[in-house]
Image: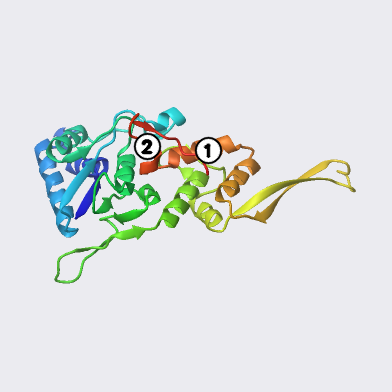
Amino acid sequence: MRTLLIDGDVVAFQTAAAEEKAFEFEPGQWTYAADAEQGKANVDLAIDYYQSILDAERVVIAISDKENWRKEVLPTYKSNREGQRRPMILSALKDHLASTYETFIRPTLEADDILGILATSKTLIPGEKVILSIDKDLRTIPGIHWNPSKETRYPAGRDPVAEPVKVSMKEADLLFYSQALSGDAVDGYAGCPSIGPGRAKKIVRNPYELVREVSTISRGPNAGKERVRWVKQPTTDVWRAIVSHYERAGLTEEDALVTARVARILRVEDYDFKERKVKLWSPS
C-alpha cells in the first residue's frame, strides 16, 4: 500500500495565496479579497490530483503546531518572517484540511518534523510512503520524495507522469550536515560565516579538518610575533570537519551544535513518543 504524506502547510499556503485577488473598490483605493469556499474546493482538487497521479491508497496531511520547539533552541528561528502578511484564508484552509482528511498535528512540531517521523517509522504507517513537498529541506529525510513542481513529466498527448525520487540515508545525512554548516537564510538561522550551501556540500562530501597551527615569525618587521595558520588535514569525521570551520571563524562547537539542531528535521529516532518531546540531535 502506498501512502502519500503531504505537507499541509505548503498546500494551504499556495492555495490561499493563489486565491487572493486585488480589486479597486474606489478610485485609487485597493484591497484584496479571497473566496474561502473556492479555496477549500481547490485544496480538495489538488489532493485528489496528487493521490491519483501517484496511485496512492492513503493520504496523510501534516500541519505545524502554533508552538515551535526550535525556538527553545534558537529564539530567533524564523524571526525574519515576522511582520510578513499571511494569505487571508490560510487559517480557514488549514482548518479544512484538519476536518476533512487524516491529519497529524503534534505539540511543538512543524509539519516537516511530522512528515520525517512518519516517513522513517517502520510501524506508524505501513507500506510505501511518498513525501510530497516543495521544501528542499525535507530531502534530509531518507525515503521517497516528490516535488510536483519539479518532478512531473508531461508527455505529449498523455496524462502527466509523477517521477518520485528516492533519497538514500547517505544523501539525506550529507544534506543535513551541509545545512549544519551553511545554515538556512530562508528559515532565518545562520551557519558558519562565509560558507554558503554550495561550498558546504563540497566540504561534507570530501571532508577535511582545519587545524590551527601557531608559529613565531623569525625575521622581518614582525619578528617575534605569533603567526596563526589553519592547515587542511583529511578526516572521515564529518562533524569534526564542520566544527573546525566554525572554530576558524571564531565560533565554537556549541554554535555549530545549535545550527545542527535547528536544521535537523526529525526522524523517528529523534522523538520521545512517551513524553511527546523532541530528542535534541547530538553527534555520534
Question: In what element is the residue under mark 1?
Answer: helix
Q: Provide residue 172's location: percent of width, then percent of height.
A: 42, 53
Question: In what element is the residue under mark 2?
Answer: strand
Q: Name the amino acid type tagged 1.
A: Leu
Inspect this view and state whether residue 245 appears.
yes
Query: Which of marks 2 and 1 precedes in the sequence?
Result: 1
Viewer-side residue, 116 vs 225: 116
Residue ID at (33%, 34%): 273
Q: Does residue 175 sit above or below 255 in this rendering?
A: below
Q: Does residue 247 sit above or below 66 in this rendering?
A: below
Q: Give the side of residue 251 with respect to residue 6, left or right.
A: right
Q: Which residue is mark 2?
A: 271
Q: Give the side of residue 26 with respect to residue 182, left or right.
A: left
Q: Provide residue 102's location: percent of width, then percent of height.
A: 17, 41
On residue 257, the disc is 1
Q: Name the amino acid type tagged 2.
A: Tyr
On residue 43, the disc is none
In 3D space, how far apart are the residues under numbered discs 1 and 2 (Cα atoms)? 18 Å
Q: Does residue 272 sit above or below 115 in this rendering?
A: above
